[in-house]
Amino acid sequence: MNIQDSPGSQAPASPVPGRFFIPDGSRVPEALQRTTHLGVGAHHDDLEFMAFHGIVEFFGKHDRWFAGVTCADGKGSSRGGAYASLTPEQLAETRSEEQIQAAGIGGYGAMIQLDYPSSRITNPSDPALRADLFQILQATSPEVVYTHNPADKHSTHIGVFASLLEAIRSLPATARPRQLIGCEVWRDLDWMCDSEKVRMDATGHDSLASRLNAVFASQIGGGKSYDLAVAGRRAANATFYEPREGDESTQVLV
């Protein structure tokens, strides 16, 4: 995919694909190289919902950095209310701007948007996304990667997971992330044994979570109460994770 510029973004001085936004103004190569935790999501807002742990873990720090990748272009997103009359192109631009705003609020080290139509992401015979993610992994060398879990029921999420997994497996064993975390979005993971889950505590960051969730007004105002649903799921995870002890946490991601 060709490199594209957008307002507030930079064209990278490297062959890494995508449109870039670097909140602190660093050059793209340096911003990518400092990445320690990488989130790879299908849609604008997936990172904030599923990889919030990686965002808050290093919020305001300068020795470890979270970078995000959004793969889909957003043209097929649901629309309603004040956004009902937007064309697919206008909705895509709106969602892209929301993602850039979230990256600024969250202090991401880098934000990359790949702008793939869902039809390509879900096509197992199309290798383009896998190749782009391989290049991004090479440029960032993250220790930890957050993405969709393989039991997610959204086909575009599964397409991103499959392409990312293939990209990771294409790396030399010594260059692969130490941890790949499949996160909840369009299906919870209550059915899994606790020993197979990664419990990620986000207690004490309600204000930042609310600010990030509220950015995506085109979806929330369009009839999907993602902000309430995400906060409710995290609260439920905190309470129902352990049946015999009192709650030590109020917001937990799995």
Image (spheres, rainbow, N blue to C red):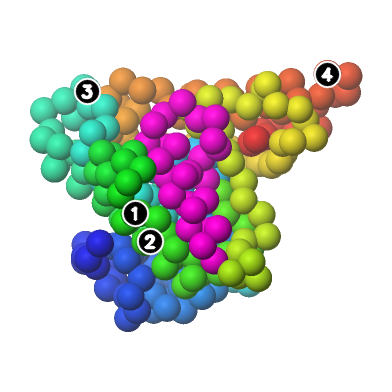
Q: Considering only order in the chain, which callout, 3 or 1, is on the residue closer to the N terminus?
A: 3
Q: Are marks 1 and 3 in contact (CB under 8 Å)?
A: no
Q: Is residue 208 left or right of residue 129?
A: right
Residue ID at (51%, 62%): 170
Q: Are marks 2 and 1 in contact (CB under 8 Å)?
A: yes
Residue ID at (31%, 41%): 123
**Residue with the mark numbered 3:** 80
Residue type at mark 4: give it: Pro
Q: On screen, 79 above or below 147?
A: above
Q: Quadrant of residue 14?
A: bottom left
Residue type at mark 2: give it: Ala
**Residue with the mark numbered 1:** 127
**Residue with the mark numbered 4:** 243
Residue ID at (27%, 32%): 77
Residue type at mark 3: give it: Gly
Q: Secondary structure at mark 2?
A: helix
Q: Secondary structure at mark 4?
A: loop
Residue 130 in the magenta stretch? The answer is no
226 vs 204, nearest the viewer: 226
**Cα separation between marks 1 and 3:** 33 Å
The numbered disc on residue 131 is: 2
Q: Is residue 182 left or right of residue 212?
A: right
- Measuring from the top left, give residue 130's x and y in whole percent: 40, 55
Q: Residues within 10 Å of mark 1 (few under 14, many from 20)?
A: some
Q: Is residue 82 left or right of residue 120?
A: left
**Cα separation between marks 2 and 3:** 34 Å
Q: Quadrant of residue 27?
A: bottom left
Q: For the residues carrying marks 4 and 2, which lies nearer the camera in this image? A: 2
Residue type at mark 1: give it: Pro
Residue 171 in sight here: yes
SS assignment for the magenta stretch, majority: helix
**Which residue range is magenta in the image?**
147-171
